[in-house]
Amino acid sequence: MTTIDEWAARWAAGQTGFHEAAPNELLLRHGAALLAAAGSIALPRRARVLVPLCGKAHDLLWLARRDVDVLGVEGVEQACRAFFEDHGATPSSTLLGAGHVFNAVGADPALAAVSLLCADFFTLGASTAIASPLAPLSARFDAAYDRAALVAIPPARREAYVDVLGALLGPGAPLLLVSFEYDQSRVDGPPWSLSANQLRQLFASSFELSHLETRAVPVRNARLATAGVSAMSESCYLLRRRGPRV
């Protein structure tokens, strides 16, 4: 099982091939649908978007530039600090019950709309309350975005991940999810392969799922390529938390 300490070791060693140098292309194409759905729930206030296992993704700032508040959850402190430093800001941190919340000091308005919670995502839930610029976690989020989160989690922990998402998202809240699929028989993850059928089974009890797009992508992961993985696809799904909107 990949632990936070193991991920921290990868960050310390510069083994961050999963980090993209620009916002994800599928987010660029389908992010508007996520934000429109989130806005319809959040009116008249700003929507609150949750980004689990976010690393230092450029996707965070892309979302924040579209007039939403963003909370990323990341277990590795180095990644939290690097996000703000890469955008020319000095991060400050506040120690809270669930972990440290990092924010930008003297940042532009979009960067100031991003908060990063350095904590174990699996310890969070609807009853978790932290004093954050985005309000307590117990105030459910209007939307979530997952790019390289679920695929980084060993299969045995997938159901727990969905349970936490379900607790943090309000009824009707959308989730934009990007996954990978490849010949898992050749090598174990991360990233782990996730088929459409696996996702439907995993989310069936608490989310409705719609497939948006699948595209072929190069096998950039050296470990997968060495194991003989020669083909990989990336898929994008829009899910909605079941239950009446409130």
Image: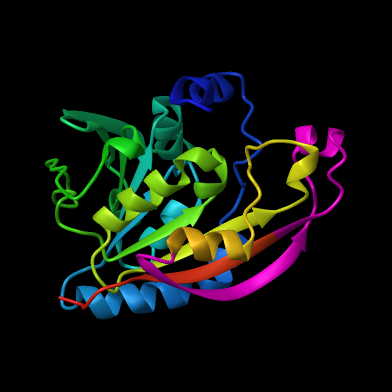
Q: Which residues are magenta?
A: 204-233
Q: Is residue 181 above or below residue 37?
A: above
Q: Position of residue 207 (x, y in %)?
A: 38, 68
Q: Position of residue 29 (x, y in %)?
A: 57, 73
Q: Out of 75 and 179, give the one closest to the viewer.
A: 179
Asked if residue 10 lies in the magenta stretch, the reply is no
Image quarter of residue 26: bottom right
The answer to whether any part of residue 165 appears in the image is: yes
Asked if residue 231 lies in the magenta stretch, the reply is yes
For image coordinates 28% across by 49% down, the residue present is 112
Image quarter of residue 154: top right
Q: Is residue 31 above or below residue 40?
A: above
- Determine whether, in the image, residue 127 is placed left or right of residue 209: left
For image coordinates 15% across by 56% down, the residue present is 139
- Determine whether, in the image, residue 42 is placed left or right of residue 147: left
Q: Is residue 168 above or below residue 239?
A: above
Q: Is residue 193 above or below residue 196?
A: above
Q: Out of 86 and 31, give the one closest to the viewer.
A: 31
Visual colour scheme: rainbow
For image coordinates 16% across by 30% down, the residue present is 96
The answer to whether any part of residue 62 appears in the image is: no
Q: Position of residue 170 (x, y in %)?
A: 23, 65
Tell me the quadrant of the picture where the C terminus can be found: bottom left
Image quarter of residue 109: bottom left
Tag count: 0
For image coordinates 53% across by 73% down, the residue present is 30
